Amino acid sequence: MRDVAIVGAGMTQFGRHPEKGIKDLVRGAVELALADAGVESGVIEAAYVGSAAPGLMTGQEQIKAQVTLSAMGIDSIPMYNVENACASSSSALNLAWTAVAAGVFDCVLAVGFEKLYDENRLKSYMALGTATDIEMGQKHMEEFQKTLGIQDQVFSEGAGANKSIFMDMYAFYTRRYMEKYGLTQEHFAKIAVKSHKNGALNPNAHYRKEVTLEQVLNSGDVAYPLTRMMCSPVSDGSAAVLICSKEKAAQFTTKPVWIEASVLGSGRLGYDMDDTLTRRVGKKAFEVAGIGPEDVDVIEIHDATSPSEIIALIELGICPPEDAPNWIDEGYMELGGKMPTNSSGGLASKGHPIGATGLAQVYEVVNQLRGTAGPRQVPGNPKIGMTQNGGGILGIDGAAMAYHILKS
């Protein structure tokens, strides 16, 4: 397999953009990525475009890549439409990386976008809720509770109508970690405060205001222990990267960011809450890159809810589980901490336009490794960065998970 480099990266500001359609979103990110690489669109040999729910939200299905890219003059080349829940754009990057590494193409575009916000919140929540097994999902959860004798109910009143059903699922998993490792609601509120602090430094973030611990705790209950400020907002947005073979990259830049690992995995049906997709695929990503958890300098975690940050760090072997409360209390996940996590503000502050989220994480890590992240730059000249992007629920496991390990 050939070495593959990221030579250009761009993203739009995440947020509520009722005035922008999917063509506007894609154009914005692609133009920024091309400008970052200093090249014209003619160098692109193929495009992989990830999105999760534009059909449900806008009516556009089937040829989303062709529709959005042709509007900005990119046509004729092979285009691949990629759908994999919230991991859609990182899955697009995985496919793009595979093609370049295998020698099929030398220069490829990967894009992710989502038009998720709607004044009718139920429409957005229903779209998000399709990332489960519609036929068997409820039955799987009932059997899981019965098998393990768990009395704690997963779904609360209003799930799927007043909030995404995923919030109830995240809350259920989070309560297990509270029981096992002494984590509290206040610990998760501290993570949210950190995320909003970082988001305030990110011009592309949906929320750009710092918040206090009290504000997070009093922001409105979603599903215990989650409050509103611990949960990612419904956002619109896009992100894109241009990747090339080593030889082609040398024509465009003297400071490429190398993709050391691009690993995608899927969930499995079962009742073991310790056998998670995060653990399985994360282990494989480290093996492919030839590094260990201790080698990562900066990481972007799929924090659809704030507790997900510390849970993922535990499951990846980065944070010893018994040390989790102390990691939060001591600020180890801060920009200047032991393991800077979600320097972008994460999904909780930066926003979560689901089909764009994975590549937005990559965009952040690319800037961190280049030293171009501005006021949110992680000190110490980070060399290795990682992204974790998950999507959907299969039984009690994640449905899709993509990891990318990048090196400057």
Image (cartoon, helix red, strand yellow):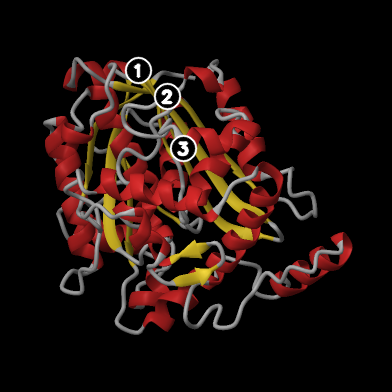
Of the residues shown, which amino acid type is indicated by label 2? Lys
Instruction: Point out residue 300 in the picture as x, y percentages from the top left corner.
Output: 41, 38
- Position of residue 249 relative to residue 399, above or below, is above
Image-based side of 152 in relation to 340, left or right: right
Q: SS at mark 3?
A: helix
Instruction: Point out residue 404 in the picture as x, y percentages from the top left corner.
Output: 46, 33
In this rendering, does residue 7 appear at all?
no
Report how far apart the C-alphas of labels 2 and 3 lie in the structure: 12 Å
Image-based side of 376 in relation to 138, left or right: left
Q: What residue did someone put label 2 on?
A: 338
Circle number at residue 383: 1
- N-terminal of the pair, mark 1 or mark 3, is 3
Circle number at residue 329: 3
Q: Residue at x 29, y 16 (%)?
A: 380
Instruction: Point out residue 356 in the picture as x, y percentages from the top left corner.
Output: 35, 53
Which is nearer the eye, 377 or 128?
A: 377
Of the residues shown, which amino acid type is indicated by label 1? Lys
Mark whose residue sits in front, 1 or 2: 2
- N-terminal of the pair, mark 1 or mark 2, is 2
